[in-house]
Image (cartoon, grey):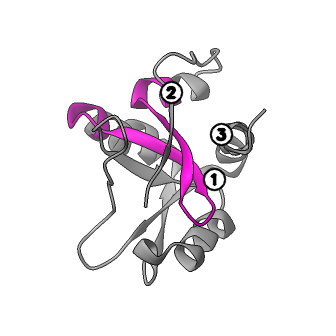
């Protein structure tokens, strides 16, 4: 399993266990960079330390603050809005280039319904 794949598996496990996810924002809002496929993804992390490392290591995200979101609110509010807007969900991006998997909101919701998540449509991207 690739490092990004390990981060994806950790997101699935940790977010369900913790009951929270984390994103980042600055005065302009929450980032939604464009990936290599031309689609935008909003990043989420399963632990505040994971998000904090990206803020510290990635120049484009320096100065961003962490935002904590309850998993229930995230599943019922955030993911439907992202889906409506045609956005992807970035999970546990890591490293100096904020590399990780981007999934559809439907794929992520499926994780929380205890159904196997399909691999179709996953893209591993760098976000710097």
The mark lying in front, picked from 1 and 3, is 3
The mark lying in front, picked from 2 and 3, is 2
Q: Which mark is residue 8?
A: 3
The one nearer the camera, 123 or 71, is: 123
Q: Quadrant of the C terminus?
A: bottom left
The residue to which callout 2 is attached is: 122
Classify 10 Å Cα crowding around label 3: few (below 14), some (14-19), many (20 and above). many
What secondary structure is marked by label 1? Answer: loop
Q: In this picture, is 124 found above or below 104?
A: below
What secondary structure is marked by label 2? Answer: loop
State the image coordinates of residue 47 (x, y, percent, origin top left): 66, 60
State the image coordinates of residue 123 (x, y, percent, origin top left): 49, 32
Magenta stretch contains residue 102: yes
Magenta stretch contains residue 41: no
Mark with earlier residue (1, 3)? 3
Left of 94 or right of it: where is 76? left
Q: Residue at x 69, y 52 (%)?
A: 18
The residue to which callout 1 is attached is: 46
């Amino acid at each position: 399993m690739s490092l990004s794949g390990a981060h994806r598996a950790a997101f699935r496990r940790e977010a369900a266990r913790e009951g929270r996810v984390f994103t980042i924002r600055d005065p302009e809002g929450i980032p939604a960079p464009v990936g290599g496929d031309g689609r935008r993804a909003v990043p989420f992390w399963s632990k505040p330390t994971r998000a904090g490392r990206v803020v510290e290591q990635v120049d484009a995200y320096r100065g961003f603050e962490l935002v904590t979101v309850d998993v229930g609110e995230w599943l019922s509010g955030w993911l439907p809005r992202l889906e409506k807007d045609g956005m992807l969900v970035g999970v546990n991006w890591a490293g100096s280039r904020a590399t990780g998997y981007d999934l559809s909101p439907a794929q992520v919701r499926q994780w929380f319904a205890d159904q196997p998540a399909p691999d179709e449509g996953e893209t591993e991207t760098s976000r710097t």
